[in-house]
Image: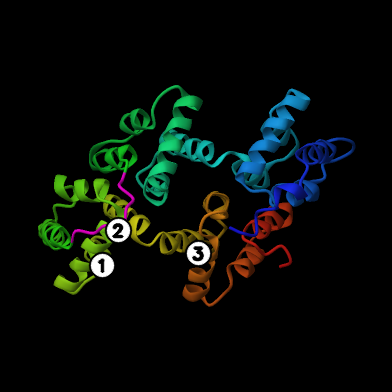
Amino acid sequence: MSTISVPAHDISVSDDVEQLRKAFSGWGTNEGLIISILTHRNAAQRKQIRETYASTYNEDLLKSLDKELSNDFERLVRLWTLDPSERDAYLANEATKRWTKSNQVLVEIACTRSAHDLLLAKQAYHACYKKSIEEDVAYHTTGDFRKLLLPLVGTYRYEGSEVNMTLAKTEAKLIHEKISDKCYNDDDLIRILATRSKVQINATLNQYKNQFGKDINKDLKEEPKDEYLSLLRATIKCLTYPEKYFEKVLRLAINKTGTDEGALTRVVATRAEVDMKTIKEEYQRRNSVPLDKAIAKDTRGDYEDMLLALIGCEDA
């Protein structure tokens, strides 16, 4: 997102590092200073800050932050400060260790990142956890969930703009047959979703709607309480309309009785530099309320301030 970038010549990394150290020193922590520095630095700048901080003070910035901050604010600062690939590795590891059938974080990472970003996340996973993401997904999941998730995290999709319309028509028909027969875990259905490029999948699903008069996710809602089908719908939404997927995650996180801070923190930290503008537009369109107003109503203090700064509403 353009709001989170400052021209390099306007920033002295050593100044930022010194200011951050000051924010931790003395009586109490200066949370406002931490927010004002970190939310206005892009991923490359934050990486430089972390490296310089480590070489200057012989301590990882994340450790310093952990010691001084707490709760949802600490988690948001931690996720935001991490390099995007490390952040995805961290979230994926957390999702496998605490995996439940309703957990959609692995699908989110596998299907909304570019092929290159997913590859970087997998490399970061190797470096951080001394094993592969595929290994952990295979170990912690079972049955149809494993059958779907393993190829999704293991793929390296083609990202060109070419579309094979003949293939799209054939595969739309194939998918429709499988769904009509309730073969939701069919090998070919999973193969198409896990290996085809996103533009090819979009073309196939448009053909599906044209040929059979219904959106595929409507046909997959026949059994709304089925958790595997819910994961399959999330997969399709993440591959085709990520902004709609993230809008729904935010809507459910904010509109619940009691906010789901985990989901709110994750989406803001991972999408602020990617497609937050589109997500905000989708949220406004769907809920007739601006996202910043919804967040401000549901959160408090430093956590609220940082969330609003990251979605580009510092003055909200």
Residue 109 position in % (x across, y down)? 42, 45
- The quadrant the N terminus occupies is bottom right
Q: Secondary structure at mark 1?
A: helix
Separation of residues labelled 1 and 3 (CA atoms): 22 Å
Label 3: how many residues lie within 10 Å, few (<14), some (14-19) or many (20+)? many
Q: Is residue 216 left or right of residue 100?
A: left
3 or 2: mark nearer the eye: 2
Write down the region rendered in magenta.
157-164
Work out how far the residue at label 3 is from the one at label 2, CA to CA, in angstroms.
Answer: 20 Å
Which residue is at a point 11% across and 59% down the rendered structure image?
A: 170
Residue of label 2: 199
Position above or below: 72 against 279: above
Residue at the (27%, 36%) spot, across then down? 142
The disc at residue 279 is 3
> Nearest the camera: 231 or 12?
12
Magenta run includes residue 134: no
Q: Position of residue 45 (x, y in %)?
A: 66, 43
Disc 2, SS: helix
Q: Residue 185 versus residue 192: which sits nearer the camera?
A: 192
Residue 94 sits above or below residue 192 on the image? above
Residue at (10%, 57%) from the top-left corner? 181
Q: Is residue 73 above or below residue 178?
A: above
Q: Are marks 1 and 3 in contact (CB under 8 Å)?
A: no
On whether residue 160 falls in the magenta region, the answer is yes
Q: Is residue 130 above or below residue 194?
A: above
Identify residue type, mark 2.
Val
- Comparing labels 1 and 3, the label whose residue is closer to the camera: 3
Q: Is residue 133 left or right of residue 30?
A: left
Quick one: SS at disc 3? Answer: helix
Residue named by callout 1: 218
Q: Is residue 72 visible?
A: yes
